[in-house]
Amino acid sequence: MWRVLQRSRVYVVATKTILLESCNRTMRRAIRFIVGTCLAVLGVCRRSRLPLWIRRCNNKILFSDNFDAGELGRFSPSGNVDAVDFVDTPRRAGRYSARVSLDPATNRNHYRSEICPRSVRGFLEGRFPRIGQEYWYALGVFIPHNFVLDDDYPTMFAQWHGIPDRVFGEAYRNPPLALSIRGDNYVIESRADSKLVTPASGPDRYDFSHEFSFGSVVQDLGKWIDWVVHVRWSHKDNGLGFLTIWKDDVEVYARTGPNCFNDWRGGPYMKFGVYMWDLEFATREQLQNVRSRHLYFDTIRIGAIDVNCRDVAPWAHKVNPGPSTVGVPVQSGRQVPKSNTAPSLLPSV
């Protein structure tokens, strides 16, 4: 990286010398200003020992949206394009929340209605996080009282999905990270694989695969529940990767180790909505017997580097009056510290 910066400095200086010999006074002043700015930026970047994109995003929120515009705007649909409505009740913050619906019996895509943040600063192609970097993700989820709690057809409401390397013949895989509702429980799924091409099936398909069930969904019906994910994406078992998840201000999952796939496009991208994967190959008769579902989403935030839990967590920001968002400790959860520093101890699960 630093050799590239040094070469860039040489190229900039050489370009300046050539252009100054063939330009008038006004052009020369403009060239000196532009070249001086480039050299200053390269110098700061080199002294800081940090890539330029990291310095630009340091201590910053990379993405934040409350659906105040009443439109998808900075989000892209996945599955049913017309499955998202913007409503003023319930809402977590701002003017609107996004109501994402799935009706397996009538929707064109009978198993998926999701939306994905796009144009995230610092992300590859605006969607894919960089492997080896730390990120914070936050979203508020409202589960209505009439939501169907079904063991036969679970509902995935948030996932971080990888793009397979199709040029190498790689098939689609399960998401490296997913949050689901199965019956009356929440389920966290985490997977990782360091192979260049992950097998399409088999008992040893992934290097790591873990499923963790906890809590009670019934007690959360009719409430806004805030989820925060702190992760350093890594597909290698080198001690650098970690994953921590909070439900409201209670830590419910923490693990060190690999947590994504070895994809050339980068880390997994975020999606949320209503995804019922068990219905993908369901018959028409089966779909007629599955009730529709809808969830509400608000306060979507993504942060990086020195951004901490309180910077992204919806519970740490002023919100509109509404249903209680106080979480109930589950299992051996720990309260998030009320200071501006994120927890540094990450016990293995």
Image: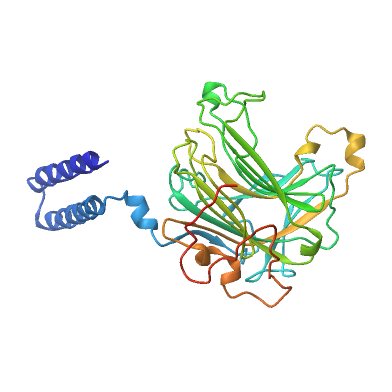
Quarter of the figure that contains the N terminus: top left
User: Which residue is painted at 24% across and 39% down in the image?
Assistant: 4
* Side (left or right) of 258 relative to 46: right
Q: How many marks?
A: 0
* Residue at the outermost bottom position: 321
Q: Position of residue 299 (x, y in %)?
A: 61, 64
Q: Position of residue 272 (x, y in %)?
A: 66, 51
Q: Position of residue 105 (x, y in %)?
A: 87, 43
User: Which residue is painted at 78% across and 58% down in the image?
Assistant: 217
* Side (left or right) of 16 relative to 232: left
Please tell me in which quadrant of the rendered image residue 93 appears: bottom right
Depth check: give the residue in front, 226 or 327: 327
Please tell me in which quadrant of the rendered image residue 223 appears: bottom right
Measured along the vertical axis of the image, is residue 339 above or below residue 123? below
Q: Is residue 81 visible?
A: no
User: Which residue is painted at 9% across and 45% down in the image?
Assistant: 17
Q: Is residue 280 visible?
A: yes
Q: Position of residue 60 (x, y in %)?
A: 43, 62
- Tell me, what colour scheme is on the image? rainbow
User: Which residue is painted at 60% across and 30% down in the image?
Assistant: 206
